[in-house]
């Protein structure tokens, strides 16, 4: 492919794919998980930022080691073999992309309702308060609900995984990036540092606009309340319009990915059971079968997300599908880091120190998820294993 992208473009891609709907969606969740403890919330943002920077920089080394390879599935195949790449691709096509699309289909609709002033019986009433002097100091010194430190911190970190996700997508332009061996690691480092700084500033900025208690009670309307307290009714509403558009844009990008998921998997696989997903419509130039499958699975995940996470249904099977599939990615990264650790052609820091740090970060995220979600992790893993077993059936080279 033509080497057409420069370092600034790659940095913009990293920043653009991470900063989006997540920070607006999860800022209120962080306050809720920490009981309104602003200091613990900021610590969670900083820790998650460090995890993201270390993970992204290590993937920069992986990108240097496999020039011409693109995306997570490509790196998984190049590092651990095609069988591992297949199961990673199946996970992305059936769990990861569809579950995120389901959340990002609900979120902009919910925000649009907030923008229009429509009440939601699930969320409850709204409270409006003006900006007062010393609001940031007040929020730092006042905790709404006392929460155990580790429970609040780990819960906030796991929630923020959604907001800090997306940087891995930048690796998909590796073959089109000029001097990718140098520029991909630089883009991942600079881009993730920018994201971490912006997120902390945004979270602290919320504390200067509205009381933590009001932000927590406002639910999805919290960001709108803060914007209107700073910029007035009209200005705040205008900024919130851009938030809604940002959510729709993120949803659109992920929808495009989910419609191609099975097509990409089928192209890389020699299984005749996946052959139907290779078909490309001559008129639309789209993989129609793959698109229909992706939208169908996304609809099922949307039904689960709203029925389980929002409405509290489905009995014990009501894990948070906006968080646990993302944490799964960190577990998926570990074999890739181990493969990097085994390489003999890399200097000590990049070949040993960085993979070890990245493995520790991934293990930390897995531990945080188990600590925060407890038994729900088991129910999620049951669903995960069942879906991967179905994937094993489709991987078979024999027709049913």
Image (spheres, helix red, strand yellow):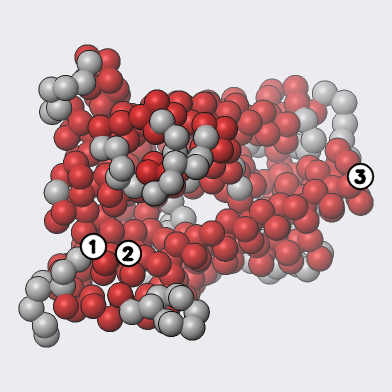
Q: What distance separates the C-alpha of mark 1 from that of mark 3?
A: 53 Å
Task: Point out which mark residue 264 bears.
Answer: 2
- Disc 3, disc 2: CB below 8 Å? no
Task: Point out which mark residue 138 bears.
Answer: none
Residue 390 position in % (x across, y down): 20, 72
| Callout 2: SS | helix
Left or right: where does residue 270 sit relative to residue 21?
Answer: left
Residue 292 position in % (x across, y down): 42, 80
- Disc 1, disc 3: CB below 8 Å? no
- Viewport quadrant of the C terminus: bottom left
| Snapshot quadrant of residue 204 | top right
Residue at position x 73%, y 47% in the image: 223
For marks 1 and 3, give the one nearer the viewer: 1
- Disc 1, disc 2: CB below 8 Å? yes
Residue 36 position in % (x across, y down): 63, 36
Using the image as rendered, state which of residue 169 and residue 245 is in the foreground: 169
Residue 184 position in % (x across, y down): 42, 32
Residue at position x 91%, y 51% in the image: 234
Q: Which residue is mark 1?
A: 268
| Snapshot quadrant of residue 394 | bottom left
Task: Point out which mark residue 232 bears.
Answer: 3
Lower sequence index among marks 3 and 2? 3
Task: Say few, some or many: other residues with alpha carbon within 10 Å of mark 1 (under 14 / 14 to 19 / 20 or more).
Answer: some
| Snapshot quadrant of residue 125 | bottom right
Q: Please say whether residue 309 is visible from this viewpoint.
A: no
Left or right: where does residue 5 sit relative to residue 292?
Answer: right
């Amino acid at each position: 492919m033509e080497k057409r992208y420069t370092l600034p473009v790659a940095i913009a891609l990293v920043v653009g794919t991470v900063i989006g709907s997540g920070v607006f969606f999860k800022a209120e969740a962080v306050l809720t998980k920490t009981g309104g403890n602003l200091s613990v919330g900021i610590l969670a943002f900083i820790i998650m930022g460090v995890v993201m920077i270390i993970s992204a920089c290590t993937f920069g080394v992986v990108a240097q080691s496999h020039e011409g390879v693109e995306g997570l599935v490509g790196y998984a195949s190049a590092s651990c073999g095609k069988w591992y790449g297949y199961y990673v691709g199946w996970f992305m096509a059936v769990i990861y992309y569809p579950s995120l699309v389901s959340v990002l289909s609900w979120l902009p609709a919910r925000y649009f309702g907030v923008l229009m002033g429509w009440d939601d019986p699930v969320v409850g009433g709204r409270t409006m308060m003006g900006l007062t002097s010393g609001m940031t100091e007040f929020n730092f010194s006042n905790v709404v609900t006392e929460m155990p430190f580790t429970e609040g911190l780990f819960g906030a970190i796991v929630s923020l995984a959604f907001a800090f996700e997306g940087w891995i997508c930048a690796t998909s332009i590796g073959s089109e990036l000029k001097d990718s061996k140098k520029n991909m690691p630089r883009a991942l480092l600079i881009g993730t540092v920018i994201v971490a700084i912006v997120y902390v500033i945004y979270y602290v900025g919320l504390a200067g606009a509205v009381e933590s208690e009001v932000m927590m009670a406002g639910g999805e309307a919290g960001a709108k309340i803060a914007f209107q307290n700073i910029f007035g009714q009209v200005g705040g509403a205008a900024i919130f319009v851009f938030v809604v558009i940002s959510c729709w844009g993120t949803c659109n990008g992920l929808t495009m990915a989910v419609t191609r998921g099975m097509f990409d998997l089928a192209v890389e696989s020699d299984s005749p059971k996946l052959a139907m997903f290779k078909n490309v419509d001559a008129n639309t130039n789209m993989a129609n079968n793959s698109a229909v499958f992706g939208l169908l699975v996304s609809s099922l995940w949307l039904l689960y997300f709203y029925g389980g996470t929002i409405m509290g249904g489905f009995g014990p099977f009501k894990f948070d599908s906006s968080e646990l599939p993302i944490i799964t990615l960190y577990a998926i990264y570990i074999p890739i880091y181990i493969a990097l650790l085994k390489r003999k052609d890399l200097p000590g820091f990049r070949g040993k120190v960085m993979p070890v740090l990245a493995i520790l970060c991934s293990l930390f995220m897995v531990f945080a998820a188990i600590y925060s979600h407890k038994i729900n992790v088991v129910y999620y893993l049951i669903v995960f294993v069942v879906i991967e077993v179905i994937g094993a059936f489709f991987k078979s080279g024999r027709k049913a």
